[in-house]
Image (spheres, rainbow, N blue to C red):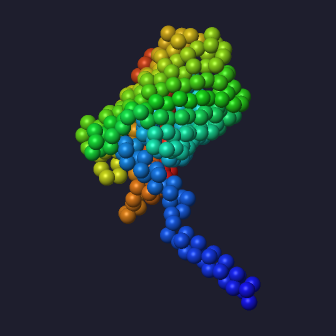
Amino acid sequence: MARILRFGILLAAGFACSCAAVGQPSFFERFSAHNSQAAALQPTWPTPVIQSDPRLTQYYRFSFSHEYAPARTETVSYGNARGGGIVAWNRAEFDVLPPPYIQHNSTAADGFGDTSTLVKLRLFSGNADHGNYILTAIGGHTFATGSAKNGALTDSWTATLVGGKGLTRRIDVESSLGATLPTGMIATQGRSMAWNALAQDHLTRFVWLELENNATFYHGGSHDGLMQNFITPGAFYVCRRADWKPTHSYLVFDGGMQIATSTFHTYNHNLIAEMRVLF
């Protein structure tokens, strides 16, 4: 009888614990809630086509690009050096960018490119009701994992400062300044600085338009003293469920084309098409 009583007590205790767990949010619900809380502290602009995004987002980005070299040969990148990111706490994001597969329509050998990682630290921000601005520092490392000369000769570090300001409820401007610093073979590879600037227009509930300027300045290496500049028009279509809430996932379809405006350029008419999953 005592054994049955003890068993009954244990069973009741287990049932009570299970009842207490009922109504507790799942890991995914807590994960999504954390992301929405972090996102509530910043603007709601879409991630630019080319420029780094100053906002913290949890996402995965499926990307494809098709460009022409000055010799009119075509290069296709499956992955386009894009990947995914996870928000940590309220100020940091960690990104992993898997190696793209690069297909050449020439005598060059096809193969995989380099792998990169990023850490973003949001320094200052305010949502649409509190200034609609943001400033973020980004540090990255690229690993020279490319095969068949489809990547860099050595690893490199990148440092970027990026920010933006909403001018109205519809229009925002953003800009970034960054440097790429190889870890070796500097005389051959050189260093570079990239400056980007853009404006975005929230045209309709689901559609955003964008115009970017992308400039790269080369120091050392075979391109020493040269610069290349592109104008990049882009568009975004945000696909959300009718009863969407900040804790719900959604899709963004976007694309753009880099058009060279400088005499020197290593490629031109770079068409980019993407699908992004934000969660």
Instruction: Please give left or right for residue 236 compared with residue 273 in the image.
Output: left
Q: Residue at x 56, y 10 (%)?
A: 220
Instruction: Please give left or right for residue 56 compared with residue 167 in the image.
Output: right
Residue 22 point in image, percent of width and height: 53, 71
The image quadrant of residue 202 is: top left
Residue that extends furthest to the front in the rendered view of this protein: 2
Instruction: Please give left or right for residue 62 compared with residue 4 in the image.
Output: left
Q: Residue at x 47, y 34 (%)?
A: 121
Residue that extends furthest to the bottom in the rendered view of this protein: 1
169 w.r.t. 111: above or below:
below
Q: Nearer the viewer, residue 29 or 187?
A: 29
The answer to whether any part of residue 264 appears in the image is no
Residue 46 point in image, percent of width and height: 40, 43
Counting the numbered discs, the total is 0
Q: Nearer the viewer, residue 64 or 96?
A: 96
256 w.r.t. 190: above or below:
below
The answer to whether any part of residue 165 appears in the image is yes
Q: Nearer the viewer, residue 252 or 178?
A: 178
Q: Quadrant of the N terminus?
A: bottom right
277 w.r.t. 14: above or below:
above
Residue 189 point in image, percent of width and height: 61, 16
Q: Residue at x 50, y 60 (%)?
A: 29
148 w.r.t. 62: above or below:
above
The image quadrant of residue 161 is: top left
Residue 261 point in image, percent of width and height: 41, 22
Q: Residue at x 41, y 33 (%)?
A: 123
